[in-house]
Image: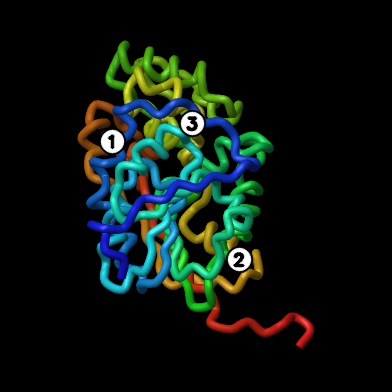
C-alpha cells in the first residue's frame, strides 16, 4: 500500500478530445467536498490494487481511496485546470490531466478499480458531439473505460438517475413569484429544447414530464448564481435499469453486481418550498442519485472460439 504521507504527487497530461468546461468556482469545490461522506460509499466496492478516480474534482474521494487497505496506487484524473490545481495539493495520489476517453493515450490499463462520481452526465453534457448525442458519447466512453480494467476489476458509478416512467406528466409548483422567475431564468439558459417543455398553468404551476421537472428541480436547487454553469449540465441520462442494459450491450465483459437509487440528503430541505404532483394529485419527489457497480469477467472467451 502506498504511504500517503510520503508519496509524491505526480502530474501528467495528455492532449486529446476533451472539451472545454466552464471555470470551476470555489463554491463548486465546497459543494463537492461537502458530499464526500456520501461519495465514500463507492469505496465499499473496491478491492485494492490500482484504482482510478475519473473526474476527481477537488480530490476528497481520491484521498479517501488512497488510505484504504491494499491500495497500491490511487490515480486522480480530471480535465479541468481548476481541479488539477486542487488535486496537486493532495498527498499520496497520482494526478493526471485528461478525460475518460483518453485512458489509452495516458497509458492507463490493468486497473483493479475505476470510480466515477457525477461524471457520466458531464461526459454527456460536454461531449464533442453535443448534449443531443450525450448518451452515445457515454457509451463510447464506457467502452474505453471497460478496456482499461483488469479481469476481475470493478467499475463503480455514482450519478444522477432518470426517474422511472420519465415521460409521464407531472405538475411542478413553484414557491411563488420568485420561484417563477428562477424557473424562467433556467428555461432561458438550458440548451436542450426538450428540457424547456414546461407549460404554465397559472398560479405558479407548470406542467411537464417527470424527466423535464426533475432536470429543472436539480438545477434550480443550486440557486440563480449557479445557473450559468448548472444549466449546461443535463443530469438525467439513464433510468436505473437502463444504464445496466447499455453497459451489457457493449459486450465488454462487464456484469452488474449492484444498483440502487435514493434521494440525497439536503435536496428535500433545499427544495421544501417547491412541490411536484402526479396527475392524480399525489405528491412526488424524484430520486436524485444512483450507484451502479460492474465487475469485469475474470476471463473472456474469444468470440470465434
Distance from disc 1 to disc 3, alpha carbons, whole Å, reads: 28 Å
Residue at x-position 53% and y-position 68%: 149
Q: Which mark is residue 147?
A: 2
Q: Which SS class for mark 1? A: helix
| Contact, mark 1 vs mark 2 (Cβ under 8 Å) | no
Q: Nearer the viewer, mark 1 or mark 2?
A: 2
Farthest left residue in view: 269
- Expressed as whole percent of the image width and height from the top left, the position of residue 236 reads 48, 43
Q: Nearer the viewer, mark 3 or mark 2?
A: 2
Q: Earlier in the sequence, mark 1 or mark 3?
A: 1
144 vs 80: above or below: below
- Mark 2, residues whose alpha carbon is within 10 Å: few (<14), some, or many (≥20)? some
Indicate the quadrant containing the N terminus: top left, top right, bottom left or bottom right. bottom left
Model colouring:
rainbow
- Residue corresponding to mark 1: 31
Residue at x-position 46% and y-position 57%: 240
Q: Earlier in the sequence, mark 1 or mark 2?
A: 1
Q: Which SS class for mark 2? A: helix
Q: Earlier in the sequence, mark 3 or mark 2?
A: 2
Residue at x-position 33% and y-position 31%: 28
Q: Nearer the viewer, residue 161 or 66?
A: 66
- Expressed as whole percent of the image width and height from the top left, the position of residue 298 reads 53, 82
- Expressed as whole percent of the image width and height from the top left, the position of residue 103 reads 58, 55
25 vs 268: above or below: above
- Residue corresponding to mark 3: 208
- Expressed as whole percent of the image width and height from the top left, the position of residue 193 reads 60, 26
Q: Quadrant of residue 64?
A: bottom left
Indicate the quadrant containing the C terminus: top left, top right, bottom left or bottom right. bottom right
Amino acid at each position: 500500500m502506498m504511504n500517503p504521507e510520503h508519496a509524491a504527487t505526480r502530474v501528467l497530461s495528455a492532449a486529446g478530445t476533451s472539451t472545454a468546461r466552464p471555470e470551476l468556482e470555489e463554491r463548486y469545490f465546497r459543494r463537492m467536498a461537502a458530499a464526500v461522506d456520501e461519495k465514500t460509499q463507492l469505496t465499499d466496492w473496491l478491492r485494492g490494487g490500482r484504482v482510478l478516480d475519473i473526474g476527481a474534482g477537488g480530490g476528497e474521494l481520491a484521498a479517501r481511496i488512497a488510505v484504504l487497505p491494499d491500495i497500491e496506487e490511487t490515480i486522480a484524473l480530471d480535465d479541468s485546470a481548476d481541479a488539477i490545481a486542487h488535486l496537486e495539493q493532495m498527498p499520496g495520489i497520482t494526478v493526471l490531466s485528461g478525460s475518460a476517453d483518453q485512458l489509452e493515450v495516458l497509458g492507463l490499463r490493468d486497473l483493479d478499480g475505476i470510480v466515477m462520481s457525477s461524471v457520466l452526465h458531464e461526459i454527456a453534457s460536454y461531449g464533442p458531439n453535443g448534449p443531443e448525442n450525450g448518451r452515445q458519447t457515454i457509451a463510447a466512453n464506457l467502452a474505453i473505460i471497460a478496456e482499461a480494467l483488469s479481469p476481475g476489476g470493478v467499475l463503480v458509478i455514482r450519478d444522477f438517475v432518470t426517474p422511472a416512467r420519465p415521460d409521464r406528466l407531472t405538475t411542478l409548483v413553484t414557491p411563488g413569484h420568485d420561484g417563477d422567475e428562477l424557473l424562467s431564468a433556467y428555461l432561458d439558459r438550458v440548451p436542450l429544447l426538450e428540457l424547456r417543455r414546461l407549460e404554465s398553468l397559472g398560479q405558479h404551476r407548470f406542467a411537464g414530464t417527470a424527466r423535464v421537472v426533475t432536470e429543472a428541480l436539480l438545477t434550480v436547487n443550486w440557486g440563480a448564481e449557479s445557473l450559468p454553469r448548472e444549466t449546461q449540465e443535463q443530469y438525467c441520462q439513464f433510468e436505473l435499469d437502463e444504464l445496466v442494459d447499455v453497459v451489457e450491450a457493449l459486450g465488454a465483459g462487464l456484469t452488474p453486481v449492484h444498483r440502487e437509487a435514493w434521494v440525497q440528503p439536503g435536496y428535500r430541505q433545499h427544495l421544501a418550498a417547491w412541490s411536484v404532483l402526479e396527475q392524480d394529485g399525489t405528491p412526488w419527489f424524484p430520486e436524485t442519485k444512483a450507484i451502479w457497480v460492474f465487475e469485469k469477467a475474470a476471463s473472456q472467451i474469444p468470440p470465434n472460439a
